[in-house]
Image: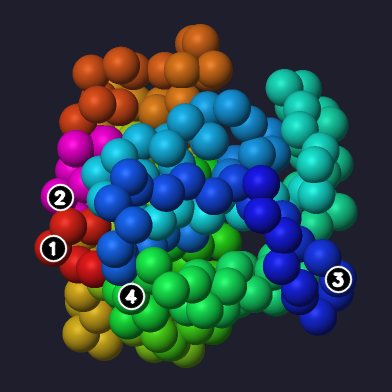
Amino acid sequence: MVTFVCDTGIVSGFLALPRDPSRHRAIIVIHEWWGLTPWVKSQASNLAKNGYVVLALDLYHGEVTPISSQARKLKRNLSLDQAIGEMKAAFDYLVRRANVDPKRIGALGWSMGGSLALQLAMHEPRLAACVVNYGALPTKLADIEKISASTLGIFGSLDRGIPPKKVRAFEKRMNAVKKLVEIKIYDNAGHGFENPSNILKFRPKTATDAWLRTLRFLNRSI
């Protein structure tokens, strides 16, 4: 774990590094409402194996839970302003690292983290790419116009919270203001289908395809 300073105090995150010590592209990884779980850390490590410096931010400051009611409470207690401030501090931390190319930094998140990755794209114009895995999407054109990062959205057709209709509306608004966006909606997949901890919703083959799609997108966008 590494720590760095934010306006609201000390922030921490799980740092995963490629073996090669030279300069690399970098990614800020943002967790689901469960917190910085071992699965999120493993995803960060997998990205590092693909040549990225990866900082998996801990927005809950050490708290992790597998219980939905507790996760809901942790999410509710996380203010948007605090999350944006800590994500921007994470971006600045990566910019300062000698092994990071400051012009080639992206963000990736799942569910709550996917929504927050888009918030970072709205508030950090230097962000090069953004991957949103079944995260809530902005609807106001004024917010969408703030997004400068190339964006990949990955969703499931059975997601009741973010149904395909909302996803396509976001895609249409992005295209209307000439933003770079790619959308993939997987059939027979619901919310959280990439995380094996979601036993009933996990779709192994679909999750593998989503991961490969993400890597291809990042490789050409950062």
Q: Earlier in the sequence, mark 3 or mark 4?
A: 3
Residue 220, disc: 1
The magenta segment: 210-217
Q: Which residue is disc 3 drawn over?
A: 9
Q: Is residue 135 above or below residue 62?
A: below
Q: Earlier in the sequence, mark 3 or mark 2?
A: 3
Q: Which residue is disc 4 drawn over?
A: 101
Q: Are marks 2 and 4 in contact (CB under 8 Å)?
A: no
At label 4, counting other C-alpha atoms closer than 10 Å, the crowd grade (few under 14, some 14-19, many 20 or more) is some
Q: Main secondary structure of the magenta part?
A: helix
Q: Do the residues labelled 1 and 2 touch (CB within 8 Å)?
A: yes
Q: What's the residue type where badge 2 is placed?
A: Arg
* Nearer mark to the viewer, of 3 and 2: 3
Q: Which residue lies furthest to the top in this view?
A: 199
Q: Distance between the residues labelled 1 and 2?
A: 6 Å
Of the 4 image quadrants, the one containing the C terminus is: bottom left
